[in-house]
Amino acid sequence: IATEQRADDIKKTLEIFRKLRSEDPEFIFSVDLDEDGQIKTLIWVDGRSRINYSCFGDVVTFDTTYTTNLYKMPFGLFVGVNHHFQTTFFGGVLMRDEKAESFAWVFKEFVGLMGGVPPKTILTDQCRAMEVAIQETMKDTNHLWCRWHVFKDARLELGPIYRKNSAFRDEFHEFISEMYTIDEFEGAWKDLLERYGLEKHHFLVKAYDKRHKWAKAYNKGKFCARMVSTQRSESANHMLKTVVPRDSSMNRFVENLSRFFHTRYTEEVAAEHETKHLL
């Protein structure tokens, strides 16, 4: 992609942000530049998302599995759930890379844009760089893994033994979804791996080492607002695919996403209106 085209795209993107700011005084964006003055990371939140975060920001998911736009930049989305159990969006991020220092910048900026209040719990995929950044920037926040990512990786790593309707798959899902005591979990996990001869499987060894990130037995009392469900991240990914083409320019991506957020906010208002009329 020509340098001139990229520069024009960035210019148009910043123009869209300024337009959004003129329409919404609470809209804020922040840019991290590299040594050449080029955009490295970009984060933005609007007024409605900031209000929603103040009400429903105790538990947040952050997902960067949707790679978008002409430059193949990972797109990060901060997602929550409101009192109607609707998915609500807190902010968007475009990143040039997924290094720990980049994630640290994102999380620090996000907390700052949201009034300096970090979430009580954040759910992500198993990205090590993200884990390091969360430990650095949100020391008092519980960091858990979203089930959707655990299931997806299990399907990729375990192959045929994890096929649909297999006995192993059912038992593995039970470990993630059902409530055990720690002793029950430890005994049942050991038994499962021995029965299937998987004691040394690299994926399961790694999963066990990080069991406090996903096993319910180790997370009793941690408020998750039902966000550990696979559906929240999965639905957000699906919605992005229907709203924003993967080959869109940066400015078109931001514009389409802004329209999508507005549509979701309208749905939230409708749900609130309906609830009030039922009371």
Image: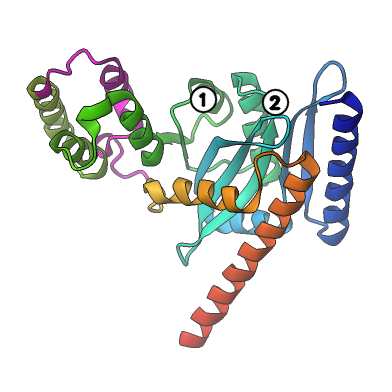
Q: Residue 126, position in %: x, y?
A: 43, 27
* First reached walking from the N terminus: tag 1 or tag 2: 2
What residue span does the magenta drawing correspond to?
Answer: 196-223
Residue sitting at 53 percent across and 56 percent down? 56
Q: Amino acid at mark 1?
A: Gln
The picture places residue 248, in percent across and down from the top left corner, at 73, 42
Amino acid marked by disc 2: Arg
Asked if residue 274 lies left or right of residue 213, the reply is right
Query: Where does the N terminus fall, quadrant-wise?
Result: top right
- Is 14 one of the magenta-colored residues? no
Q: Is residue 205 magenta?
A: yes
Numbered tag placed on residue 151 in the rendering:
none
The answer to whether 31 appears left or right of 279 in the picture is: right
Question: Given the current orientation, which residue lies at the most extreme top position?
Answer: 200
Q: Tell me if mark 2 has few (under 14), some (14-19) or many (20+) residues whose alpha carbon lies within 10 angstroms of its own.
A: some
What residue is pinned by disc 2? 96
